[in-house]
Every structure is written in structure tokens, then in C-alpha cells.
């Protein structure tokens, strides 16, 4: 169900929930969870089903159980909007999560950094680990390979009999890997790959190389 | 004053104009003055406005004999019109009476086009006679102290009720009326409707089943017989006639003599893009019409539309290319000829359009029918019969539209707040909610207050609050503001306004179309070639261009289905062709096409059901011809492909039109197995249909409207510059979330009920299947596409259905990509 690839001779495992596990560093990368989005909508009078709030935590627990990483890094847009009561749920979740958590902040992350540091979460604008760059917005930098999010990439497929499909995907160019949005209740944006690009679509609990 | 004296006033006014009141006008006056409610069945241009403005004014005179010296300001009557464009016309006739009778009454309009200044003025002093739309009426109910505004209102007239009846705007109207019945001390409710099949029901929906209002009401019929002649434009050379021209432009030369012969001609097209193209092409080929020809559709700006309407009245235009935007209201005496381009899809609509011509008393209405593909000539032949037998269809009213109810209750909570025990009985007496249960009601109230059915501590849901005395009220300013923006039940794609760079508004187009444009691209809009420059603050900036282009904005919606009456007529015509007993010129002209169809496949006889299969480079085509109308075909194709999928997993895309439906797949379907397993059975029809819906997208699309109407999705207001991006979500996402977490939500469920009742017409599907059960199946395995199949296989708008594992499909797809 997962896919493993070598980038600059290090091993990375792509998980169908949208995370990437970096084996050598035992580091799990997750992007665009948009926590608090359901609560935010409800606070403004749009009755999104309340039960959907918990789904993101169930998914997070699932992937953490699978990889048991030492470190967890969110690549931005962890929270959808300003502070709301979903923060309490997040606090509880952080408390019972053994991995060391850090956040590379994105355009949606407007919650005060102190709130995060109080939970022991470090915030970075970007992170450089050897030849790897972790950012929120896609960026190609010389002599680096980038992991980023922001786009919520998806891909469209066509087949015989005028069939069409749209699927969220990991989008890898030569020097960059764009992660799909991890969160439930997030949209996506269709990208058109060129010949050099590698696409790993998420299909019914599987990562499929296209 | 006695009724006789009052009638004298009206009669003498008619005499001064040199007119004589029609019996239906007198009947309406009498009933109104007797205090009755009612429904007036009268066509456009028959003097229906005077049938109701007069008794309203006479009632005022009767109640205020000293009106000349002592006039009490404030709302006396409301006139509801479904189209803003009609309000001017209605205002003019009201003002004419008021002026001639020297009454101190004022007439005002309040629609989406009314300026903020004018609105503010109306808030302090309402005009005596108010002309407005269903949405603006709801907005009045959303303003504080609305009860005082409506207190002295004695009449409400709902014009073009047939247009509202089968829509959610009709439901909105029902709710508005249910409130006004209580708020106004002495109210008469009247509807005006063109002829539809279910007039009696239309009256019941307007007044509410089992109400005293319905008991004390009448149905007045105008019974103005009109002679209508239908002439088909039959191509000279059938060989060159394309199967699916879609636009009918190849017959352009044939209509020029018709336009030249008559004073003013209206050309009705079915879509706005078709309208744009026809206008463009006529001018290109016959530049001499420049200045004498205009275009009219819903997205052209208001000033232009009004100008066009005025120009028609002044007889300064030779031809106007238009859409349904000119279907209603406005009376254009100078129109001599009407041309219908493409199938009108319904008898009532066709008759109404035909009625736009020859408005002079005793004049004959002439309508030309221009087919856009060959098979439409069969339609033309069927329309001839329909006109002769004056067969018209029903308008199906909505039931249990909880989305509209949620919106309405929020509206009341926004203004003065409401007490459930007061509102519930009102709602139970509307047609739409006559079957609402106590549980459903309680569910809705919970939904309004908690956004769910139980309270959780971390939840901050905020919308309607319950005050200590039990009143439901919105106290949050932001929520109230967003709700007012959102009132209205017509849901469209987000639209952007089109402006010249220097300013100057041209009209509006859908965001979907703009998203495909690059700077420098040229497109046709409002009859001009425009170059796209950029989007700035939700406005599309353009400049004129001389470049030729064939890009025309497409507007969604407007895919109409044949009514059952029309389908039956169509089948009869077709059978005439099959049995070679055809006599009409239309069918005769089609003879060589029927011959070709016979050669490749077969022309079905009444006791036959035709199935064709063949392969093209698109895939394997399986085509079925029930001739039951688009809606039934949509349902049948969904049902059938679901059942086929039970035999072996399948993925197919579905296309349907009024004649049949196609299942296109990347693998052949075993038709013999379909027949052997009796897949057309009515047994378990409902269950299967329900399951089939889970695997396709119809309910999903219905849910879009429901989510917007009930306020779960906020669309924002680009025109007003209000951007609420952080609150925008796609209803697609929301649909998935509901399916996974709250499948028993009433609003989610509604998407499915609506699909069954309104889109798929379950009842008709059953009858159609029963009919097929008695027919002999004719399965033709063809070499290539047949004439009948052509319009179907070229249709690009498709439903998709699959019960295969996605991973399996993708593996097949990637194989193709790699080749």
C-alpha cells in the first residue's frame, strides 16, 4: 500500500494518508492538515457535521502508529484559521503523542507562536537538513531537494470510453516533492505533469505510481 | 360606495381608452371585491394586469371614501413578479390607472436593481403599491418590524405563478404568503398563471391546502382562443443536413426572407451561447441588418435589455435574437413573427412563445420552427399535433424542501425573531410542508440552534439563539449580514461582471468560463468581440477587438426534458415513420434518413424496443431508445448500468437526450445477458435506483443547491466586493463529509428525494419500464454509428458511473497513457 523511493540515496516511504516517512532520520512529514476548519465553519454558522472534527486525529494516529517516528514535522497550514475550541483537542492530542513535533509555518498559520511553544512545538520558516529543504510554499533551490505542500496537488486521468478521474497525489519533479493535503475536508488543485515528473496517486488506501 | 358604483369607475376608464373589459376581467373584479382569493388563468398580453390592478384600486377607494383629502401613507398592495425586467411594465399600467383616476397613490419597485438610496427611502415610507420579486419580499421579512410594514396591506398578486410553481422560488413564495396571512389584517391573495395542466393544483399551492383562503377562492379562466400556425423550416437538400449541428446555422439563409417579410421577428434560442452565435452569424452574413437587429438574454446588462424592449415597442427593430428572457410578460404588439431555433422541449413553452406574435385582437400567431438536427423534425411534427390538441404539461410543485425552510426560519430569526409554536401551524398549512412531522420540525429547530442534534462542550456553533422567553433570534451582526446576502433560491455558478477597462458594464459571465481564458484571448459576448485583459477585484476587464473568434461563454443550466405529453406525441410521430404512414411534410423530408437508419439498423415500430451496439475509437457504444424524454432516460440509464454492474463490474459514461440514452464503456457489455436477466424489470426498481445514485453524481449536484440555500455553504458576493474566502468550501467536499458522518441529516437526504421526484420522475420511469416489458426487443449490432445514435454519441455532457475498484481502472488507464 505504500511506495518507497530513494532520493539523494536516502529512503522515503509515501503513505496513502498523505504523509512521507524519512527512514534514516525517523522523521514523518505531513502537510496541509487544516485543523480547526470544521470548527471554524461552525463558529460562523455553517453547519458542517461536527463528527468530522475527529477524523483528522484518527488519521494522524493511524499514520503515527504505522511508522512510530521519533520526529514529526508539519509542512504548514496546520491550522486553518484563528484560534477556536478545536485547539483543546489539539493540545490533548499533542500531549499523548510521543514524537517530537515541529512546524514549518504556512500562509494559514496565524495562531500565535507562543501557543505552539507552550506545547513544546518549534516553529520554523523553513528547515534545511543536509541537502533537503522543508518549506510550505514550493521552492526550487540550488543543490537542494525540497519537500513542500501548499498546493494540495491532484491529477486527472483519462481512459478509453471517455473515462476521467481526479485523484489527490504526491507530485515529484526533479528537485522537489509536493505533498498532498493530509486533512479531511480540504479541496485540491489539478496539476499537469511533464515527462520528467513522477506522480504517486492516492487511491482507496494505496499509493499508486502513475 | 356600492360595487355597482365602483364598477362604473372602471368601466368608464375602459371607455375612455376605447376598450371594452373582457368577461374574465369583470369576473376577477367581482370576485376580488367580494373578498375572494383566487387564481386567474390568462395569457400574456390579454390585459391581466388591469384585471387585478383595478379591483385593488377600487378596494382602496371603497375603504377610503375621503382619500382626496385624507390619504394614509403605507403599503396597500404587493405585486410579485418572477422577473425584474417585467416590473417596469407593471408599474406603468398601475401608474396609468392611478394617474387617470386622480388618486394620491404611489407606485414603487423594489428588486435587486433598486438603489440603496431608494431602498432607504422605502424603509421610512413604503409606496402604496409595491412591485417586487419573491427574493426581495423575503428580504423585507428579514428587516426589523416587518409586521408594521405589512399591516395594512390588502392584496398580494403573484404574477406568472406557473413559472414559480415548479421551483424553489415557488416554495419561498408559499412561505412568504403563510406569514403574510397572519400579519396582514385583511389580505386577498391572487395568482396569475398561463395555461398549465394542473391549474387546480396551482391554486391549492398558492393558497394552502385545507385553508379557509382556499375555500373562499375562485379560478377565473380567460378562455381567449388564439389561432396558432406552426411552420417548419425544412432544408432544401437533406443530404447536406448535419446530424447534430446543435445550432442550426446551416439554415440561416432560409430565415432571412422570413425576417424581411415581417415587421418585427423574435428568434428564440434555447441557450445564451446559441443566442450569441446566431446574432453574430446573421450580422456576418447579412451586414445590412446592422442597427436593425438586437440581442436579448439574461446576462446582458439591464440598460441594454430595457433599450431592446423599448425598441421592439417602437418598431425600430427588424429582428431580436433572444432566449427565454423574453418568454414572459412584456407585451410586444409589433411582433409579427416568431422563430423557434431548436426544440422548445415543452408544449406550454412553445405555445407561449408562439403567442408572442400577432398580439392584435383576432390576429393569427405564426411560429416557425427551425430544427438544429434532423431528428428534431420529428419533434416539429409532434408539435403540430400538440398545438392542434392544445396539450399542455403540468408543473410539479416541490414537497418538503427543508433547505428553503431553514433559510426562511433564519430570515424570521434575523428580523424580529419567531416563536416556534406560532410559526409551525402556518407552515403545516402550506402545500410544500403539509406532511411535515413534529420530529422533523424539532430536528430543524435543533439544526438552527446547534447545527446538529445534540450539544457538545467544545462546539462553538453559532447561528440562531433561543432567548429566555423561547424566542428564536439571530443576535450576531455578521450572521445576519451573511444571511441577507444569501437570501434567494436560484443558485448559479459564481458569476463575474464584465467591464471595459475604462468602465462601462457589459454583463455577467460565469467564473468557470473566465477561468479558461488567458490574457489576449478574444471571446464573443453581448454581440461584441472582446479581448480579455485581466480580472481585477472580481471584475473581468476587457477591450473591443477586431479579431475573429469562436469562443462563446457557456452558461450552465437550461437542460430541459420533454414532458410526458410531448414524449408520447413524439413516439406516435415516429411510429408513423416506421409504419410508413407519415403524411406531414416534416416526416416526408426525413425519409432518406429513415431509409439510412433502416439500412444500418432499424426504425422501431410501436411494439418494438430498439437497442444498438457498435464500436468507435471512443469506446464501445450501447444505445437504447425508449423515447420517453430526457429525465426518464437519465433515471433508466442509471438504473440499468447499476444492474449491469451487478452481473460484472463495469465503468461507463452515460449520455441521454429526449430520444434515448447511451452507455459508453471501455469494454463491451453483454446485451444478451441484459435481456436474459430481465434487467428492465420494475421489481426492486426503487431500491436499485437508490443504490445506483450512490455511485453517480446526480444527488451530489442537487446537494450543491441545498447546501447554498440552507446556508451551509457561503458563496460570497463578488459584485458587492464581499470576499469571505475563509468560509468558502465546495459543496462537493461537504457532500462527502455528510455522507461519512451525518448520512441521516434531513438536508443531505433531501438531495436524494429531490433527485427521485424532480429529476428522475420515478413514476414515469415505472410506466416506461412497464411499457418496455411488453415490447419486443430489437437488438442491432451495427458496423458504425447510426443516424439515430449520432446526437447521443456526440454529446459531451455526461454522467459517470462505476462499481469497479478504482485501482483496477487506473491500471487500465495508465496502460493507455503509456502507449
Image: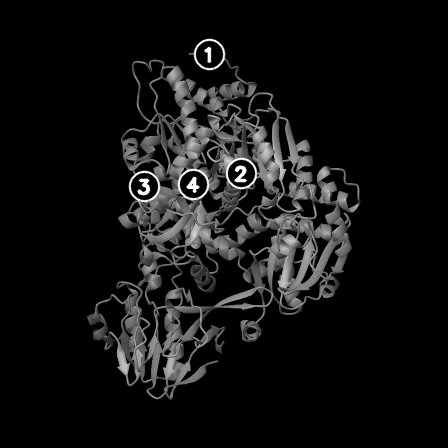
Residue at the spot of label 2? B286
Cβ atoms under marks 3 and 2 closer than 8 Å: no
Q: Tell me the subunit letter for badge 1.
A: B
Q: Which residue bears the numbered disc 4?
A: B300
Nearest-to-viewer mark from 4 and 1 = 4
Evaluate if marks 1 and 2 touch, with contact meaning CB atoms under 8 Å apart: no
- Residue B478's place in the image compared with A191, above or below, is above
Colour scheme in use = one colour
Nearest to viewer (mark 1 / mark 3):
1
Seen at 75% across and 52% down, the residue is B596
Front of the two marks 1 and 2? 2
First reached walking from the N terminus: tag 4 or tag 1: 1
Disc 2 chain ID: B
Q: Quadrant of the N terminus of chain B?
A: top left
Locate residue B575 relative to residue B340 in the image: left or right: right
Same chain under badges 3 and 2? The reply is yes
Chain letter for mark 3, please. Answer: B
Q: Secondary structure at mark 3?
A: loop
Q: Which residue is mark 3?
A: B415
Residue B331 in view, yes or no:
yes
Q: Which mark is residue B16?
A: 1
Chain hosting mark 4 = B
Q: Position of residue B111 (x, y in %)?
A: 37, 36
Q: Nearer the viewer, residue B82 or B370?
A: B370
Residue B268 coordinates in the image, percent (x, y): 55, 38
Question: How far is the residue under mark 1 from the one under mark 3?
Answer: 46 Å
Do marks 4 and 1 both belong to one polypeptide chain?
yes
Q: CA distance from mark 4 to mark 3?
A: 34 Å
| Discs 4/3, front | 4
- Asked if marks 4 and 1 touch (Cβ < 8 Å), the reply is no
* Mark 4 nearby-residue class (10 Å; few <14, some 14–19, many ≥20): many
- Is tag 3's residue or tag 2's residue first in the polypeptide sequence? 2
Amino acid at each position: 500500500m505504500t511506495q518507497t523511493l530513494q532520493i539523494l540515496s536516502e529512503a522515503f516511504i509515501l503513505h496513502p494518508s498523505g504523509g512521507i516517512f524519512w527512514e534514516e532520520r525517523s522523521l514523518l512529514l505531513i502537510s496541509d492538515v487544516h485543523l480547526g476548519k470544521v470548527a471554524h465553519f461552525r463558529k460562523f454558522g455553517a453547519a458542517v457535521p461536527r463528527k468530522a472534527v475527529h477524523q483528522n486525529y484518527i488519521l494522524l494516529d493511524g499514520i503515527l502508529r504505522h511508522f512510530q517516528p521519533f520526529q514529526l514535522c508539519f509542512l504548514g497550514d496546520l491550522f486553518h484559521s484563528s484560534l477556536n475550541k478545536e485547539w483543546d483537542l489539539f493540545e490533548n492530542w499533542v500531549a499523548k503523542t510521543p514524537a517530537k513535533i515541529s512546524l514549518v509555518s504556512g500562509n494559514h498559520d496565524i495562531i500565535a507562536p507562543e501557543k505552539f511553544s507552550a506545547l513544546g512545538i518549534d516553529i520554523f520558516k523553513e528547515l534545511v537538513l543536509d541537502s533537503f529543504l522543508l518549506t510550505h510554499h514550493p521552492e526550487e533551490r540550488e543543490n537542494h531537494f525540497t519537500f513542500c505542500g501548499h498546493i494540495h496537488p491532484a491529477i486527472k486521468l483519462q481512459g478509453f470510453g471517455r473515462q476521467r478521474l481526479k485523484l489527490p497525489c504526491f507530485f515529484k519533479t526533479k528537485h522537489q516533492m509536493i505533498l498532498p493535503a493530509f486533512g479531511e475536508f480540504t479541496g485540491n488543485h489539478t496539476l499537469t505533469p511533464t515527462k520528467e515528473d513522477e506522480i504517486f496517486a492516492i487511491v482507496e488506501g494505496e499509493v499508486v505510481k502513475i | 360606495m356600492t360595487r355597482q358604483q365602483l364598477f362604473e369607475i372602471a368601466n368608464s376608464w375602459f371607455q375612455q381608452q376605447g376598450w371594452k373589459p373582457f368577461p374574465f376581467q369583470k369576473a376577477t373584479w367581482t370576485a376580488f371585491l367580494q373578498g375572494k382569493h383566487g387564481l386567474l388563468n390568462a395569457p400574456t398580453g390579454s390585459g391581466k394586469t388591469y384585471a387585478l390592478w383595478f379591483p385593488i384600486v377600487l378596494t382602496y377607494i371603497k375603504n377610503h371614501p375621503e382619500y382626496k383629502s385624507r390619504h394614509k401613507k403605507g403599503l396597500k398592495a404587493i405585486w410579485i413578479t418572477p422577473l425584474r425586467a417585467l416590473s417596469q411594465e407593471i408599474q406603468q399600467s398601475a401608474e396609468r390607472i392611478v394617474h387617470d383616476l386622480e388618486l394620491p397613490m404611489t407606485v414603487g419597485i423594489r428588486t435587486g436593481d433598486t438603489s440603496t438610496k431608494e431602498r432607504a427611502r422605502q424603509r421610512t415610507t413604503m409606496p402604496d403599491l409595491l412591485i417586487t420579486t419573491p427574493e426581495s419580499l423575503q428580504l423585507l421579512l428579514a428587516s426589523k418590524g416587518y409586521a408594521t410594514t405589512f399591516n395594512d396591506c390588502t392584496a398580494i398578486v403573484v404574477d406568472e405563478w406557473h413559472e414559480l410553481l415548479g421551483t424553489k422560488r415557488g416554495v419561498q413564495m408559499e412561505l412568504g404568503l403563510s406569514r403574510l396571512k397572519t400579519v396582514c389584517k385583511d389580505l386577498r391573495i391572487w395568482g396569475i398563471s398561463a395555461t398549465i395542466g394542473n391549474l387546480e393544483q396551482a391554486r391549492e399551492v398558492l393558497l394552502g391546502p385545507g385553508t379557509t383562503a382556499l375555500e373562499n377562492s375562485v379560478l377565473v379562466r380567460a378562455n381567449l382562443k388564439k389561432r396558432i400556425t406552426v411552420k417548419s423550416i425544412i432544408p432544401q437538400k437533406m443530404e447536406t443536413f448535419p446530424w447534430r449541428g446543435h445550432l442550426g446555422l446551416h439554415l440561416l439563409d432560409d430565415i432571412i426572407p422570413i425576417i424581411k417579410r415581417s415587421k418585427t421577428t423574435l428568434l428564440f434560442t434555447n441557450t445564451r451561447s446559441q443566442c450569441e452565435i446566431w446574432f453574430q452569424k446573421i450580422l456576418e452574413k447579412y451586414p445590412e441588418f446592422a442597427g436593425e437587429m438586437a440581442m436579448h438574454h439574461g446576462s446582458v446588462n439591464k440598460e441594454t435589455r430595457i433599450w431592446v424592449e423599448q425598441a421592439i415597442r417602437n418598431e425600430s427593430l427588424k429582428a431580436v435574437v433572444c432566449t427565454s428572457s423574453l418568454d414572459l410578460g412584456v407585451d410586444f404588439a409589433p411582433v409579427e413573427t416568431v422563430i423557434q431555433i431548436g426544440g422548445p422541449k415543452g408544449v406550454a413553452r412553445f405555445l407561449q412563445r408562439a403567442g408572442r406574435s400577432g398580439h392584435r385582437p383576432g390576429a393569427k400567431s405564426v411560429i416557425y420552427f427551425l430544427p438544429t438536427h434532423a431528428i428534431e423534425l420529428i419533434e416539429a411534427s409532434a408539435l403540430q399535433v400538440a398545438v392542434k390538441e392544445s396539450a399542455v404539461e403540468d408543473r410539479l410543485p416541490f414537497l418538503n424542501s427543508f433547505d428553503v425552510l431553514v433559510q426562511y426560519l433564519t430570515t424570521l430569526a434575523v428580523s424580529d425573531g419567531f416563536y416556534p409554536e406560532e410559526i409551525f401551524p402556518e407552515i403545516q398549512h402550506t402545500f410544500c410542508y403539509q406532511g411535515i412531522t413534529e420530529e422533523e420540525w424539532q430536528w430543524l429547530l435543533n439544526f438552527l440552534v446547534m447545527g446538529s442534534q445534540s450539544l457538545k462542550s467544545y462546539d462553538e456553533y453559532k447561528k440562531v439563539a433561543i432567548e429566555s422567553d423561547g424566542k428564536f433570534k439571530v443576535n450576531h451582526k455578521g450572521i445576519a449580514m451573511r444571511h441577507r446576502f444569501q437570501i434567494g433560491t436560484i443558485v448559479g455558478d459564481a458569476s463575474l461582471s464584465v467591464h471595459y477597462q475604462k468602465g462601462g458594464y457589459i454583463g455577467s459571465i460565469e467564473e468557470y468560463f473566465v477561468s479558461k481564458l488567458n490574457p489576449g484571448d478574444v471571446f464573443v459576448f453581448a454581440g461584441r468581440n472582446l479581448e480579455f485583459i485581466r480580472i481585477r477585484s472580481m471584475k473581468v476587464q476587457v477591450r473591443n477587438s477586431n479579431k475573429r473568434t469562436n469562443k462563446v461563454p457557456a452558461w450552465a443550466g437550461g437542460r430541459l426534458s420533454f414532458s410526458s405529453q410531448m414524449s408520447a406525441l413524439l413516439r406516435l410521430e415516429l411510429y408513423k415513420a416506421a409504419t410508413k404512414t407519415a403524411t406531414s411534410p416534416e416526416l416526408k423530408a426525413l425519409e432518406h434518413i429513415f431509409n439510412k437508419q433502416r439500412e444500418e439498423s432499424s426504425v422501431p415500430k410501436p411494439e418494438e424496443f430498439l437497442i444498438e451496439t457498435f464500436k468507435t475509437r471512443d469506446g464501445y457504444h450501447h444505445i437504447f431508445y425508449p423515447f420517453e424524454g430526457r429525465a426518464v432516460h437519465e433515471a433508466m440509464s442509471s438504473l440499468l448500468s447499476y444492474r449491469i454492474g451487478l452481473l460484472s463490474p463495469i465503468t461507463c459514461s452515460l449520455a441521454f437526450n429526449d430520444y434515448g440514452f447511451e452507455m459508453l464503456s471501455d469494454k463491451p457489455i453483454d446485451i444478451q445477458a441484459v435481456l436474459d436477466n430481465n434487467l428492465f424489470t420494475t421489481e426492486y426498481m426503487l431500491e436499485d435506483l437508490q443504490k445506483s445514485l450512490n455511485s453517480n453524481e446526480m444527488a451530489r449536484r442537487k446537494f450543491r443547491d441545498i447546501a447554498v440555500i440552507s446556508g451551509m455553504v457561503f458563496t460570497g458576493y463578488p459584485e458587492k466586493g464581499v470576499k469571505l474566502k475563509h468560509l468558502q468550501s465546495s459543496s462537493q467536499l461537504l457532500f462527502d463529509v455528510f455522507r461519512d458522518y451525518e448520512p441521516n441529516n434531513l438536508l443531505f437526504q433531501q438531495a436524494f428525494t429531490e433527485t427521485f421526484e424532480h429529476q428522475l420522475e420515478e413514476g414515469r420511469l415505472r410506466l416506461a419500464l412497464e411499457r418496455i416489458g411488453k415490447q419486443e426487443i430489437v437488438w442491432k449490432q451495427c458496423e458504425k454509428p447510426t443516424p439515430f445514435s449520432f446526437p447521443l454519441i456526440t454529446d459531451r455532457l455526461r454522467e459517470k458511473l462505476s462499481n469497479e475498484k478504482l485501482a483496477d481502472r487506473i491500471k487500465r488507464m495508465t496502460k493507455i497513457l503509456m502507449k
